Each structure stands twice: as structure tokens, then as C-alpha cells.
Image (cartoon, rainbow, N blue to C red):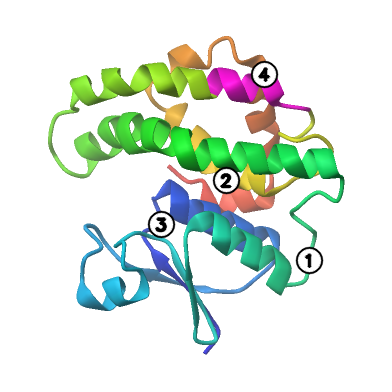
Amino acid sequence: MGIKLYGVAGSPNVRGAMLGLAEKGVDYELVDVFPPFKAPDHMARNPFGRVPVLEHDGFLLYETQAILRYVDQAFPGPALQPADAREAARMNQILGIVDCYLFETWSGAIGFERLIATSFLGRPCDLAQVEAAVPLARCCAEALEAVISAPYLTGGTFSLADIRLMPHFDWLRRTPEGEAMLADKGGLVRWFEQVRARPSAQAVLQP
């Protein structure tokens, strides 16, 4: 049956899975699933009605972090999880920040309202929602800037932390709020300038 990734290519979470697959050199089919993701066939894949969902020879898996860990373990190619205990712990910490705090503010509120609502949904940006998200979004940026360890987020290993953050950072930097909060985040800005040059990023992180 091969490998299918269900989702919409512009989604930061779907792009995270796409980046992981690209880094491992895995061929897959992207199957378009469009919002609101509530069609019965998709709800059968993910009862929460979210994307992405990975299908590998009949094995279905949802949640981006779980998909990335599976892809790293199931396929040959460069390891995407550090062998060093402290570097691995930092990777897990950053993944937790992204999933628990950053996604809902950087992408779910600011990015969505600034980039998707206006360009694709044809409605004005909900500035109240954007403004409400800014304090936690800024806290996430400050927390990441405090723990980043060059050349990659966790140090010497390009890891799942980098992959998970890249598409969210890419969205945030395109917004006025992101531009303001990243103005003094030199570590994060230098990190993104480096990782965006990778072939996977060039293929996936398109406007």
C-alpha cells in the first residue's frame, strides 16, 4: 500500500511531518484533506478531526510528534533524535513547548488570522484574537531563545525539535507580531536562516 500522508500542504503540522519524511528520504503520497476535516472518512482516520495522519501499509497514526518519531524509527537515513541524554531531553522539552503552548499562539491564532483568514477565507483578521495570543507567543519565543544551543536547537544534532519548530517559525516571521517579537531573538533568527537552507526546507516551506 505504500505511504500516504493525509492533510493540507499549507498546515504547519502537516509540513512538520513532510519535513521529517523528506529528511529521511521517504517517498510518500500527500492526500489532500481540506478543512474542517470532519468528513466521515477522515474522522475514521483521526477521531479528533485533525491533520496530519500517516498511513504506512495499513498502519494509521495521527499526531505530528508521534508521526515524526515513527518515521525516524521505521525508516533508514540520518537519525533525527540525539544520542546524548541532555540533548535528547532538550529536544523533548522543545517538542513539549511547541505542542502545549506555541502551536495555539504562533500558528493557531496569530499565523492563522494574519495569513489564512485574510488570504484564503476572505474575511478580516480578528485582531482581538491576535492580541490575546501575543503574551504567550512572546513567552514561547523568549523560552526558546533562552535554551537554544547552536548550531541547531539542541546543539550539534539536527533533530525532531528543529523539524517541529521550523514551519511554525516560518508562519510567525511573516506576521507583524512575529517580526516585532523576533527582532531581538538573534539566536532563533540565525537558527532559522541556517535550517531553511536545507533541501527539505526548500521543498516544503513554500509561501
Q: Is residue 122 visible?
A: yes
Q: Residue at x 53, y 52 (%)?
A: 16
Mark 3 / mark 4, whichever is N-terminal: 3
- Front: mark 1 or 2: 2
Q: CA distance from mark 1 to mark 2?
A: 18 Å
Q: Which residues are magenta?
A: 141-149
Mark 2 / mark 3, whichever is N-terminal: 3
- Front: mark 1 or 3: 1
Q: Is residue 142 magenta?
A: yes
> Please, what is the three-letter code of the amino acid marked with disc 4?
Ala
- The answer to which image quadrant residue 187 occupies is top right
* Percent coordinates x, y for residue 175 in the rendering: 38, 24
Callout 4: 10 Å neighbours few (<14), some, many (20+)? few
Q: Which mark is residue 164?
A: 2
> Please, what is the three-letter code of the amino acid marked with disc 3?
Ala
Q: Residue at x 81, y 34 (%)?
A: 155
* Percent coordinates x, y for residue 163 in the rendering: 62, 47
Mark 1 / mark 2, whichever is N-terminal: 1
Would you say 206 lies left or right of 74 here? left
Q: Residue at x 53, y 17 (%)?
A: 182
Callout 2: 10 Å neighbours few (<14), some, many (20+)? many
Would you say 179 lies left or right of 200 here? left
Q: CA distance from mark 1 to mark 3?
A: 23 Å
- The residue pinned by badge 4 equals 146
- The residue pinned by badge 1 equals 77
Q: Looking at the figure, which quarter contains the C terminus?
A: top left
Q: Is residue 165 above or below residue 175?
A: below
> Please, what is the three-letter code of the amino acid marked with disc 1?
Gly
- The residue pinned by badge 3 equals 9
Q: Is residue 196 visible?
A: no
Q: Is residue 181 magenta?
A: no
Mark 1: which secondary structure?
Answer: loop
